[in-house]
Image (spheres, rainbow, N blue to C red):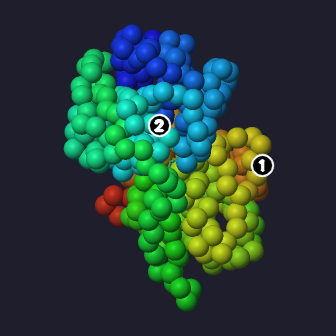
Amino acid sequence: MKHLSLPSQLVIRQHERLTQQSLLVVNAPDPEVADILPVVAHWQWHAGYAERWQHQQHEVAHHFDVAPPATTTAEAALVWLPKEKQLTLYVLDALCHLLPPGAPIWLVGENRSGIKSIHKQFTDAVAPSQKVAVGCHSLLICTQVVQSTKHFDYQSYFEYCELPQPGQDTPLQLASLPGVFAFPGIDAGSAMLLQHLPHWQQGQVLDFACGHGVLGAWLNRQAPALQITYLDVSAIALAATKRTLALNQLQGDCVASEGLQTSLGKFDYVVSHPPFHTGLATDYVIGQQFLGQVAQHLRKNGELWLVANRFLPWPELIEQAFGHCERVAEDNKFAVYRAQQRS
Ligand SMILES: C[S@@+](CC[C@H](N)C(=O)[O-])C[C@H]1O[C@@H](n2cnc3c(N)ncnc32)[C@H](O)[C@@H]1O
Protein backbone atom coordinates (compact mmCIF):
# COMPACT_ATOMS: atom_id res chain seq x y z
CA MET A 1 0.00 0.00 0.00
CA LYS A 2 3.02 2.28 0.52
CA HIS A 3 3.39 2.82 -3.23
CA LEU A 4 -0.09 4.34 -3.43
CA SER A 5 -0.64 8.09 -3.27
CA LEU A 6 -1.35 9.42 0.24
CA PRO A 7 -5.04 10.22 -0.51
CA SER A 8 -5.50 6.68 -1.90
CA GLN A 9 -4.01 5.28 1.30
CA LEU A 10 -6.52 7.26 3.36
CA VAL A 11 -9.38 6.07 1.16
CA ILE A 12 -8.34 2.45 1.64
CA ARG A 13 -8.06 2.91 5.40
CA GLN A 14 -11.57 4.38 5.39
CA HIS A 15 -13.06 1.92 2.92
CA GLU A 16 -15.85 0.83 5.27
CA ARG A 17 -17.41 4.29 5.05
CA LEU A 18 -17.35 4.09 1.27
CA THR A 19 -18.91 0.72 0.59
CA GLN A 20 -22.61 1.73 0.92
CA GLN A 21 -23.05 2.89 -2.66
CA SER A 22 -21.60 2.09 -6.05
CA LEU A 23 -18.93 4.63 -6.91
CA LEU A 24 -17.78 6.73 -9.84
CA VAL A 25 -14.13 7.55 -9.09
CA VAL A 26 -12.72 10.71 -10.63
CA ASN A 27 -9.06 11.63 -11.22
CA ALA A 28 -7.88 8.63 -9.20
CA PRO A 29 -4.23 7.77 -9.77
CA ASP A 30 -4.30 4.28 -8.26
CA PRO A 31 -6.45 1.51 -9.79
CA GLU A 32 -5.78 -0.62 -6.68
CA VAL A 33 -8.55 1.26 -4.84
CA ALA A 34 -11.09 -0.61 -6.97
CA ASP A 35 -9.90 -3.91 -5.45
CA ILE A 36 -11.44 -2.73 -2.18
CA LEU A 37 -14.16 -0.21 -3.06
CA PRO A 38 -17.39 -0.80 -5.05
CA VAL A 39 -16.15 1.15 -8.08
CA VAL A 40 -18.38 0.78 -11.14
CA ALA A 41 -17.12 3.71 -13.20
CA HIS A 42 -13.96 5.76 -13.65
CA TRP A 43 -13.53 9.25 -15.19
CA GLN A 44 -9.98 10.19 -15.97
CA TRP A 45 -8.16 12.89 -17.99
CA HIS A 46 -4.55 11.70 -17.34
CA ALA A 47 -3.54 9.32 -20.16
CA GLY A 48 -1.08 7.37 -18.00
CA TYR A 49 -3.53 6.76 -15.16
CA ALA A 50 -6.26 5.90 -17.66
CA GLU A 51 -4.04 3.22 -19.21
CA ARG A 52 -3.20 1.69 -15.83
CA TRP A 53 -6.88 1.61 -14.84
CA GLN A 54 -7.90 -0.01 -18.11
CA HIS A 55 -5.15 -2.56 -17.75
CA GLN A 56 -5.94 -3.50 -14.14
CA GLN A 57 -9.69 -3.04 -13.70
CA HIS A 58 -11.67 -4.84 -16.38
CA GLU A 59 -15.06 -4.68 -14.65
CA VAL A 60 -15.09 -0.88 -14.39
CA ALA A 61 -16.61 1.44 -17.04
CA HIS A 62 -13.67 3.64 -18.05
CA HIS A 63 -14.01 7.12 -19.46
CA PHE A 64 -10.95 9.10 -20.61
CA ASP A 65 -12.07 12.54 -21.71
CA VAL A 66 -12.32 16.20 -20.84
CA ALA A 67 -16.11 15.82 -20.48
CA PRO A 68 -17.72 13.54 -17.89
CA PRO A 69 -19.38 10.29 -18.97
CA ALA A 70 -22.83 10.86 -20.48
CA THR A 71 -24.49 8.58 -17.93
CA THR A 72 -23.46 6.41 -15.02
CA THR A 73 -24.93 3.64 -12.92
CA ALA A 74 -22.93 4.93 -9.92
CA GLU A 75 -24.87 6.19 -6.91
CA ALA A 76 -22.03 8.33 -5.52
CA ALA A 77 -18.74 9.87 -6.63
CA LEU A 78 -15.28 9.87 -5.07
CA VAL A 79 -12.98 12.60 -6.37
CA TRP A 80 -9.20 12.88 -5.95
CA LEU A 81 -8.88 16.64 -5.58
CA PRO A 82 -7.19 18.22 -8.60
CA LYS A 83 -4.40 20.72 -7.94
CA GLU A 84 -6.36 23.55 -9.55
CA LYS A 85 -9.43 24.98 -7.73
CA GLN A 86 -11.19 25.89 -10.97
CA LEU A 87 -10.89 22.30 -12.10
CA THR A 88 -12.48 21.06 -8.86
CA LEU A 89 -15.42 23.39 -9.45
CA TYR A 90 -15.69 22.15 -13.03
CA VAL A 91 -15.79 18.53 -11.76
CA LEU A 92 -18.44 19.36 -9.16
CA ASP A 93 -20.62 21.01 -11.81
CA ALA A 94 -20.22 17.95 -14.00
CA LEU A 95 -21.14 15.62 -11.12
CA CYS A 96 -24.23 17.69 -10.27
CA HIS A 97 -25.35 17.01 -13.84
CA LEU A 98 -24.55 13.30 -13.72
CA LEU A 99 -25.83 12.32 -10.27
CA PRO A 100 -29.32 12.81 -8.76
CA PRO A 101 -30.07 15.18 -5.87
CA GLY A 102 -28.94 13.66 -2.57
CA ALA A 103 -26.10 11.66 -4.13
CA PRO A 104 -22.95 11.84 -2.01
CA ILE A 105 -19.77 13.33 -3.45
CA TRP A 106 -16.66 12.41 -1.51
CA LEU A 107 -13.49 14.43 -2.02
CA VAL A 108 -10.04 13.34 -0.88
CA GLY A 109 -6.76 15.23 -1.09
CA GLU A 110 -3.46 15.86 0.59
CA ASN A 111 -3.59 18.51 3.31
CA ARG A 112 -1.43 20.79 1.17
CA SER A 113 -3.77 20.42 -1.83
CA GLY A 114 -6.29 22.99 -0.62
CA ILE A 115 -8.79 20.33 0.52
CA LYS A 116 -9.21 22.02 3.90
CA SER A 117 -10.61 25.20 2.36
CA ILE A 118 -12.18 23.96 -0.87
CA HIS A 119 -15.69 24.09 0.69
CA LYS A 120 -15.43 27.91 0.63
CA GLN A 121 -15.57 27.72 -3.17
CA PHE A 122 -18.64 25.47 -3.33
CA THR A 123 -21.74 26.78 -5.11
CA ASP A 124 -25.32 26.23 -3.89
CA ALA A 125 -25.56 23.18 -6.15
CA VAL A 126 -23.84 21.12 -3.45
CA ALA A 127 -24.43 20.89 0.31
CA PRO A 128 -21.97 22.26 2.89
CA SER A 129 -19.21 19.68 3.27
CA GLN A 130 -18.42 17.56 6.29
CA LYS A 131 -15.03 16.35 7.41
CA VAL A 132 -15.06 12.57 7.39
CA ALA A 133 -11.54 11.41 8.15
CA VAL A 134 -7.96 12.61 8.47
CA GLY A 135 -4.75 10.62 8.09
CA CYS A 136 -1.89 9.93 5.70
CA HIS A 137 -1.34 13.74 5.50
CA SER A 138 -4.72 13.85 3.78
CA LEU A 139 -8.34 14.71 4.40
CA LEU A 140 -11.58 13.05 3.26
CA ILE A 141 -14.67 15.25 3.10
CA CYS A 142 -18.21 14.66 1.89
CA THR A 143 -20.89 16.79 0.28
CA GLN A 144 -24.11 15.97 -1.61
CA VAL A 145 -25.75 17.07 -4.79
CA VAL A 146 -28.50 19.56 -3.88
CA GLN A 147 -29.64 20.59 -7.33
CA SER A 148 -29.01 18.64 -10.49
CA THR A 149 -27.53 20.84 -13.24
CA LYS A 150 -29.82 20.59 -16.29
CA HIS A 151 -27.20 21.15 -18.96
CA PHE A 152 -23.50 20.56 -18.77
CA ASP A 153 -21.24 21.45 -21.67
CA TYR A 154 -17.49 21.54 -21.12
CA GLN A 155 -17.22 24.06 -23.94
CA SER A 156 -18.83 26.73 -21.79
CA TYR A 157 -15.70 26.58 -19.56
CA PHE A 158 -13.32 27.74 -22.30
CA GLU A 159 -11.53 31.01 -21.64
CA TYR A 160 -9.68 32.84 -24.35
CA CYS A 161 -6.67 35.10 -24.71
CA GLU A 162 -4.74 36.66 -27.57
CA LEU A 163 -1.02 36.83 -28.21
CA PRO A 164 0.28 39.40 -30.71
CA GLN A 165 2.56 37.69 -33.22
CA PRO A 166 5.14 39.63 -35.26
CA GLY A 167 4.60 39.29 -39.01
CA GLN A 168 0.92 38.34 -38.58
CA ASP A 169 -2.01 40.69 -39.14
CA THR A 170 -3.96 39.18 -36.27
CA PRO A 171 -2.91 37.88 -32.86
CA LEU A 172 -2.68 34.16 -32.06
CA GLN A 173 -5.94 33.10 -30.41
CA LEU A 174 -5.53 30.74 -27.46
CA ALA A 175 -8.26 28.70 -25.81
CA SER A 176 -7.80 27.33 -22.33
CA LEU A 177 -9.77 25.27 -19.81
CA PRO A 178 -9.59 24.87 -16.03
CA GLY A 179 -6.63 22.60 -15.25
CA VAL A 180 -4.60 23.62 -18.31
CA PHE A 181 -1.13 25.02 -17.62
CA ALA A 182 -1.13 28.82 -17.09
CA PHE A 183 -4.97 28.92 -17.33
CA PRO A 184 -6.40 31.16 -18.70
CA GLY A 185 -3.34 32.78 -20.29
CA ILE A 186 0.21 32.07 -21.34
CA ASP A 187 3.24 31.41 -19.19
CA ALA A 188 6.21 33.82 -19.22
CA GLY A 189 8.67 30.99 -19.94
CA SER A 190 6.69 29.82 -22.96
CA ALA A 191 6.45 33.42 -24.20
CA MET A 192 10.24 33.69 -23.92
CA LEU A 193 10.76 30.55 -26.01
CA LEU A 194 8.49 31.99 -28.74
CA GLN A 195 10.76 35.02 -29.07
CA HIS A 196 13.70 32.76 -29.95
CA LEU A 197 12.25 29.93 -32.04
CA PRO A 198 13.53 29.96 -35.65
CA HIS A 199 11.13 30.46 -38.55
CA TRP A 200 11.22 26.91 -39.87
CA GLN A 201 9.40 26.75 -43.19
CA GLN A 202 8.77 23.03 -43.56
CA GLY A 203 9.16 19.72 -41.83
CA GLN A 204 7.55 17.79 -39.00
CA VAL A 205 7.38 19.31 -35.55
CA LEU A 206 6.54 17.71 -32.21
CA ASP A 207 5.10 20.06 -29.57
CA PHE A 208 5.80 17.88 -26.53
CA ALA A 209 3.66 18.60 -23.45
CA CYS A 210 1.66 21.03 -25.56
CA GLY A 211 -0.80 22.41 -22.98
CA HIS A 212 -3.15 24.66 -25.00
CA GLY A 213 -0.95 24.31 -28.07
CA VAL A 214 0.68 27.73 -27.96
CA LEU A 215 4.12 26.66 -29.26
CA GLY A 216 2.96 24.59 -32.21
CA ALA A 217 0.20 26.99 -33.21
CA TRP A 218 2.66 29.92 -33.18
CA LEU A 219 5.05 28.03 -35.48
CA ASN A 220 2.29 26.86 -37.79
CA ARG A 221 0.94 30.37 -38.29
CA GLN A 222 4.42 31.43 -39.40
CA ALA A 223 4.73 28.46 -41.76
CA PRO A 224 1.53 26.72 -42.90
CA ALA A 225 3.58 23.92 -44.53
CA LEU A 226 4.83 22.66 -41.16
CA GLN A 227 3.15 19.47 -39.94
CA ILE A 228 2.69 19.64 -36.21
CA THR A 229 2.00 16.87 -33.72
CA TYR A 230 0.69 18.04 -30.35
CA LEU A 231 1.28 15.63 -27.46
CA ASP A 232 0.08 15.94 -23.88
CA VAL A 233 -0.81 13.56 -21.05
CA SER A 234 -3.98 15.54 -20.31
CA ALA A 235 -7.25 15.15 -22.21
CA ILE A 236 -8.15 18.63 -20.94
CA ALA A 237 -5.00 20.16 -22.44
CA LEU A 238 -5.67 18.41 -25.75
CA ALA A 239 -9.26 19.70 -25.82
CA ALA A 240 -7.83 23.22 -25.38
CA THR A 241 -5.27 22.58 -28.14
CA LYS A 242 -8.00 21.42 -30.54
CA ARG A 243 -9.96 24.59 -29.84
CA THR A 244 -6.83 26.73 -30.30
CA LEU A 245 -6.25 25.07 -33.67
CA ALA A 246 -9.84 25.64 -34.76
CA LEU A 247 -9.73 29.31 -33.70
CA ASN A 248 -6.64 29.87 -35.85
CA GLN A 249 -7.80 27.72 -38.80
CA LEU A 250 -4.91 25.31 -38.23
CA GLN A 251 -4.68 21.54 -38.30
CA GLY A 252 -2.49 19.09 -36.44
CA ASP A 253 -2.31 15.62 -34.93
CA CYS A 254 -3.27 15.53 -31.25
CA VAL A 255 -1.84 12.63 -29.24
CA ALA A 256 -2.73 11.71 -25.66
CA SER A 257 0.34 10.05 -24.19
CA GLU A 258 2.34 9.87 -20.99
CA GLY A 259 5.75 10.72 -22.39
CA LEU A 260 7.20 9.79 -25.77
CA GLN A 261 6.26 6.53 -27.48
CA THR A 262 8.25 4.68 -30.11
CA SER A 263 5.23 4.73 -32.43
CA LEU A 264 5.48 8.52 -32.74
CA GLY A 265 8.35 8.16 -35.21
CA LYS A 266 10.84 10.89 -36.04
CA PHE A 267 10.57 14.65 -36.34
CA ASP A 268 12.65 17.49 -37.76
CA TYR A 269 12.05 19.67 -34.71
CA VAL A 270 10.88 19.14 -31.14
CA VAL A 271 9.73 22.13 -29.08
CA SER A 272 8.74 21.95 -25.43
CA HIS A 273 8.26 23.56 -22.08
CA PRO A 274 8.55 20.26 -20.20
CA PRO A 275 6.65 19.63 -16.97
CA PHE A 276 8.36 19.02 -13.66
CA HIS A 277 5.29 18.26 -11.58
CA THR A 278 2.80 15.45 -11.32
CA GLY A 279 -0.14 16.88 -9.43
CA LEU A 280 1.34 18.65 -6.41
CA ALA A 281 4.59 16.70 -6.34
CA THR A 282 7.81 17.77 -8.00
CA ASP A 283 8.57 15.09 -10.57
CA TYR A 284 11.82 15.16 -12.55
CA VAL A 285 11.24 11.70 -14.00
CA ILE A 286 9.04 13.02 -16.84
CA GLY A 287 11.77 15.44 -17.98
CA GLN A 288 14.51 12.87 -17.48
CA GLN A 289 12.68 10.29 -19.58
CA PHE A 290 11.81 12.83 -22.26
CA LEU A 291 15.41 14.03 -22.58
CA GLY A 292 16.71 10.45 -22.48
CA GLN A 293 14.49 9.51 -25.46
CA VAL A 294 14.04 12.66 -27.53
CA ALA A 295 17.23 12.29 -29.61
CA GLN A 296 15.81 9.01 -31.01
CA HIS A 297 12.79 10.95 -32.26
CA LEU A 298 14.85 13.48 -34.21
CA ARG A 299 16.08 13.06 -37.76
CA LYS A 300 19.70 13.85 -38.61
CA ASN A 301 20.28 17.60 -38.09
CA GLY A 302 16.91 17.77 -36.31
CA GLU A 303 16.69 20.28 -33.47
CA LEU A 304 15.40 20.28 -29.91
CA TRP A 305 14.31 23.65 -28.51
CA LEU A 306 13.06 23.97 -24.99
CA VAL A 307 12.45 26.46 -22.21
CA ALA A 308 12.75 25.65 -18.54
CA ASN A 309 13.12 27.19 -15.13
CA ARG A 310 16.85 27.79 -14.71
CA PHE A 311 17.19 25.60 -11.62
CA LEU A 312 16.12 22.46 -13.48
CA PRO A 313 18.91 20.02 -14.37
CA TRP A 314 17.93 19.78 -18.05
CA PRO A 315 21.18 21.20 -19.60
CA GLU A 316 23.24 18.32 -18.18
CA LEU A 317 20.71 15.80 -19.50
CA ILE A 318 20.65 17.47 -22.93
CA GLU A 319 24.45 17.28 -23.02
CA GLN A 320 24.35 13.59 -22.14
CA ALA A 321 21.85 12.91 -24.92
CA PHE A 322 23.27 15.16 -27.68
CA GLY A 323 26.91 15.73 -26.67
CA HIS A 324 26.25 19.48 -26.40
CA CYS A 325 23.66 21.97 -25.17
CA GLU A 326 23.44 25.57 -26.32
CA ARG A 327 21.97 28.15 -23.94
CA VAL A 328 20.25 30.47 -26.40
CA ALA A 329 18.79 32.97 -23.92
CA GLU A 330 18.05 33.42 -20.26
CA ASP A 331 16.50 35.84 -17.81
CA ASN A 332 16.39 35.66 -14.02
CA LYS A 333 13.88 32.78 -14.09
CA PHE A 334 13.99 30.87 -17.38
CA ALA A 335 16.51 29.67 -19.95
CA VAL A 336 16.04 28.59 -23.56
CA TYR A 337 18.13 25.60 -24.68
CA ARG A 338 18.89 24.16 -28.11
CA ALA A 339 20.55 20.97 -29.26
CA GLN A 340 20.98 19.33 -32.65
CA GLN A 341 20.88 15.65 -33.57
CA ARG A 342 24.22 15.23 -35.34
CA SER A 343 24.41 11.45 -35.66
C1 LIG B 1 4.84 23.43 -18.39
S1 LIG B 1 3.37 22.88 -19.21
C2 LIG B 1 3.65 23.50 -20.86
C3 LIG B 1 2.40 23.66 -21.64
C4 LIG B 1 2.53 24.42 -22.96
N1 LIG B 1 3.53 23.83 -23.83
C5 LIG B 1 2.87 25.86 -22.69
O1 LIG B 1 3.98 26.26 -23.05
O2 LIG B 1 2.01 26.58 -22.17
C6 LIG B 1 3.66 21.17 -19.28
C7 LIG B 1 2.58 20.27 -19.87
O3 LIG B 1 3.05 18.93 -19.70
C8 LIG B 1 1.95 18.07 -19.59
N2 LIG B 1 2.44 16.82 -19.02
C9 LIG B 1 2.65 16.49 -17.73
N3 LIG B 1 3.14 15.26 -17.63
C10 LIG B 1 3.28 14.78 -18.89
C11 LIG B 1 3.74 13.55 -19.45
N4 LIG B 1 4.17 12.56 -18.67
N5 LIG B 1 3.72 13.39 -20.79
C12 LIG B 1 3.26 14.39 -21.60
N6 LIG B 1 2.81 15.58 -21.12
C13 LIG B 1 2.84 15.77 -19.80
C14 LIG B 1 0.98 18.86 -18.73
O4 LIG B 1 -0.35 18.39 -18.91
C15 LIG B 1 1.20 20.29 -19.24
O5 LIG B 1 0.25 20.59 -20.24
- Please name the residue that numbered disc 2 is placed on: 99
Identity of the residue drawn at 53% across and 28% down: 74
Query: Residue 142, percent across and down?
Result: 31, 28
* Disc 1 residue crowd, few under 14, some 14–19, many 20+, Cα 10 Å: few
Query: Residue 276, percent across and down?
Result: 44, 43
Q: Is residue 128 visible?
A: yes
Question: For this rendering, which residue is in front, 187 or 174?
Answer: 174
Question: For this rendering, which residue is in front, 7 or 261?
Answer: 7
Which amino acid type is marked by label 1?
Gly
Task: For marks 1 and 2, give the one nearer the viewer.
Answer: 2
- Please name the residue that numbered disc 1 is placed on: 265
Question: For this rendering, which residue is in front, 89 or 193?
Answer: 89
Q: Secondary structure at mark 2?
A: loop
Which of the 4 quarters of the picture holds residue 341?
A: bottom right
Horizontally, residue 104 falls left or right of residue 133, namely right
Identity of the residue drawn at 43% across and 53% down: 178
Horizontally, residue 218 falls left or right of residue 225, namely left
* Disc 2 residue crowd, few under 14, some 14–19, many 20+, Cα 10 Å: many
Identity of the residue drawn at 52% across and 56% down: 153
**Eyeballing the image, is 32 above or below 53?**
above
Identity of the residue drawn at 44% across and 65% down: 159
Q: Secondary structure at mark 1?
A: loop
How many labels, in total? 2
**Eyeballing the image, is 22 above or below 332?**
above
**Eyeballing the image, is 189 above or below 77?**
below
Which amino acid type is marked by label 2?
Leu
Instruction: Work out whether mark 1 precedes mark 2 in sequence or the reverse, and give the earlier one.
Output: 2
Query: Residue 269, percent across and down?
Result: 67, 60
